[in-house]
Image (cartoon, rainbow, N blue to C red):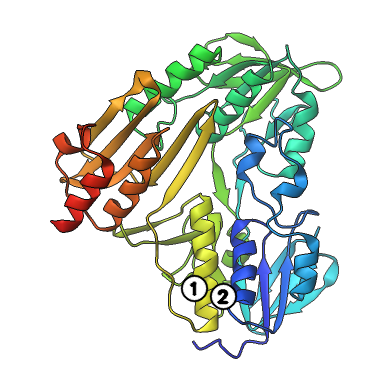
Amino acid sequence: MDLTDAKRIVVLGGGQAAAQAIQSLRMGGYDGELTLVGAEAALPYQRPPLSKAYMKGEFAEERLYFKPAAWYEDNNVDLVLSTRATAINRADRTVEIEHGGKLDYDALIIATGSRPRNLPIEGANLEHVYALRDLADVERIRPQMVAGRSIVIVGAGYIGLEAAAVAQQMGLKATVLEMAPRVLARVTSPVMSEFYENEHRRQGVDIRTETSLSKLEGTEDGAVSKAVLSDGTILDADIVLVGIGILPNEELAKDAGISCNNGILVDRDARTSDPRVFAAGDCASRPLVHFGRSGRLESVHNAIEQGKLAAAAILGKSRPVEDCPWFWSDQYDLKLQIAGLSEGYDQIVVRGNPEDRKFAAFYLKNGTLIAVDAINSPPEFLASKKLIMSGAKISADILADTSISMKEIAAKASAA
């Protein structure tokens, strides 16, 4: 469908994908009505610093914003904040919002993100039991992050481990509980899991794998005080932080009859089953063109890319290049940079020595590089992005040989 004559575009969401879509539309020459509806009071802002520098008080709130308020005013973007969209009416092309309002659209971009999974145990609603997803969460958590207190973190994914690192650096006693046999089990290899477990333990974090939480107990005033494990062990818990995964906010689309399956289903242009409706970011399930399958990607890169794709499609412009997926995580002085998706690998090649806290793990499938985890190793990360996109087959011996630079490896692979 040609949407180049669209006069009214509505964007739902206040994160990276929504902000990128707005910017790309205006930069691409769209001069019609443009409205952003955000459930939070804040201007659209970035999430990654919330569990790191912002939690530690090293990052002012204004630095989280993608653009200052003046930018939206200067670019004629109507901000409808502290307001949730409640329904999409595709027949008359309107979005219902809280308090009885309606917004007309010619094109709609859903960038509603995701929400944390709830902890399904007794005591989950006690005071000082938190998820970590938005600014309001951090504002509630940060005053409780006092040196000497005990924090129990449920879930050893990236958010849980980043929060553990911050808590330990702030002087709290941190315990991480993980049901799986190893940390980061869903997203990486045993090599990386072992490295991070060792690092956190070296820093003083109590990492407990193959451990489940039975219930939380509280004080008379309703604040959490104890975490009871399934084996009967009782841990002190002044704070409990829950990081057991997220769920895509797909309900608006699903209720409107738009196709969903663990996310709003979109094509390569971020277009849903309704040609006037697009979806981007955590809430969208997209074709993963470098891997021959579809799925959701929870990353800054994905949100930026899909915001650009949706804007380009609406404006009738050429599709932007779809990059290799990439991610990152900061813990202590460790910068983990990830390129590609390691799911389905059949060989791991380690380049460098983990004891040096500077190494990379390459993931191969049938001899083809599909992903890398690079710790304090930017050359390995940058070269791998290009190699993965080209479908390069590289000898394990060459990848492991640190006497051969990544620049040389990439050049030889390109020439092959």
Where residue 202 sits: x, y (%)? 49, 12
From the viewer's side, name the closer residue of 178 and 360.
Answer: 360
Is residue 59 depicted above or below 73 in this figure?
above
Residue 222 placement: quadrant: top right
Q: Is residue 37 visible?
A: yes
Q: Quick check: 61 above or below 37?
A: above
The answer to whether residue 215 of the structure is visible from this angle is no
| Residue name at image x 56 percent, y 48 percent | 247
Q: Is residue 182 left or right of residue 5?
A: left
- Given residues 229 and 334, the one toward you in this image is 334
In the rendering, at what x and y percent does residue 73 appear?
80, 71
Image coords of residue 285 (percent x, y): 46, 59
Q: Which residue lies under the disc numbered 2?
A: 277
Disc 1 marks which residue? 271
Dot 1 crowding, Cα within 10 Å, few <14, some 14–19, many 20+: many
Q: CA distance from mark 2 to mark 1?
A: 6 Å
Residue type, numbered disc 1? Arg
Q: Which quadrant would the C terminus be assigned to in this image?
A: bottom left
**Residue 227 image label:** none
For the residue pair 150 and 392, the one nearer the viewer reads as 392
- Residue 98: percent from left, percent from top: 81, 65
Check the image and name the residue furthest to the top.
Answer: 233
> Residue at image x 73%, y 73%?
35
Q: Does residue 72 appear left or right of residue 321 in this picture?
A: right
Q: Residue furthest bottom?
A: 5
State the residue at coordinates (56%, 12%): 204
Q: Quadrant of residue 106?
A: bottom right
Q: Is residue 201 left or right of residue 7?
A: left
Amino acid type assigned to the residue bearing label 2 in the image: Val
